[in-house]
Amino acid sequence: MNRPAVRDFALLLMRLVVGAVFIAHGYQHWFASGMSATAQEFARFGVPQPTLSAYVAGTVELIGGTFLVIGLLTTIAASLLLLLTVAATYFVHLGNGFFVADGGMEYTLVLAAALFSLVVFGTGRASLDGVLTRD
């Protein structure tokens, strides 16, 4: 078994799945429900500066998710998405218990763990970061 190849495949798979999730969320904020509805929802949850926060969240999700998928500036994108996920856990999900069916933090904790892993272990060779940093 070629351990570096397995590691690179695992990081690629995690980047693709997590990136796609955030692209979908960012798209939803920007285009499906719209920023006005997102800001109203953020206000209901007690998020500070809900309009600004909606734009920041939607942008970081859309662009950060895209960067995860292509593997560009992965550590920075994963770090920003991790901060966003921690904020979502705190403002939206923490008071609802654990399980996602109840609006709890189960899902955001899984995303946070995956993002933290990308911050710690990087992007792998199957990425633009990997191509750009090869000797």
Image (tube, rainbow, N blue to C red):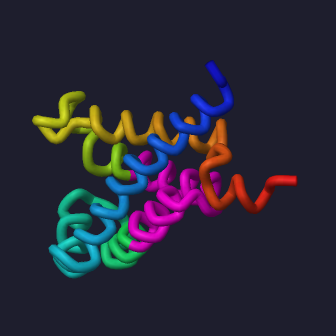
Residue sitting farthest toward the right? 135
- Type of secondary structure dominating the magenta stretch: helix
Up the image or down, 2 lies above or below 88; here it is above
Return the x and y of residue 82 as percentages of the image width and height.
49, 49
Closer to us: 72 or 55: 72
Looking at the image, residue 63 sits to the left or right of residue 101; the answer is: right
Quadrant in which residue 120 is drawn: top right
Quadrant in which residue 72 is drawn: bottom right
Closer to us: 15 or 53: 15
Return the x and y of residue 17 as percentages of the image width and height.
38, 47
Return the x and y of residue 80 as percentages of the image width and height.
54, 58
Looking at the image, residue 29 sits to the left or right of residue 127; the answer is: left
Return the x and y of residue 106 as percentages of the image width and height.
28, 32
Quadrant in which residue 93 is drawn: top left
Residue sitting farthest toward the front? 1
Up the image or down, 111 lies above or below 88; here it is above
Closer to us: 103 or 94: 103
Q: Quadrant of the N terminus?
A: top right
Q: Is residue 44 magenta?
A: no
- Circle count: 0
Q: Is residue 67 magenta?
A: yes
Looking at the image, residue 81 sits to the left or right of residue 57; the answer is: right
Up the image or down, 62 lies above or below 119; here it is below
Residue sitting farthest toward the top? 1
| Residue range of the region highlighted in magenta in the rendering | 59-87
Which residue corresponds to the image point at 47% horizontal and 34% vertical from the top-left?
A: 113
Which residue corresponds to the image point at 65% horizontal and 37% vertical from the top-left?
A: 121
Which residue corresponds to the image point at 32% horizontal and 78% vertical from the top-left?
A: 51
Closer to us: 36 or 17: 17
Looking at the image, residue 96 sits to the left or right of residue 58; the answer is: left
Which residue corresponds to the image point at 67% horizontal and 46% vertical from the top-left?
A: 125
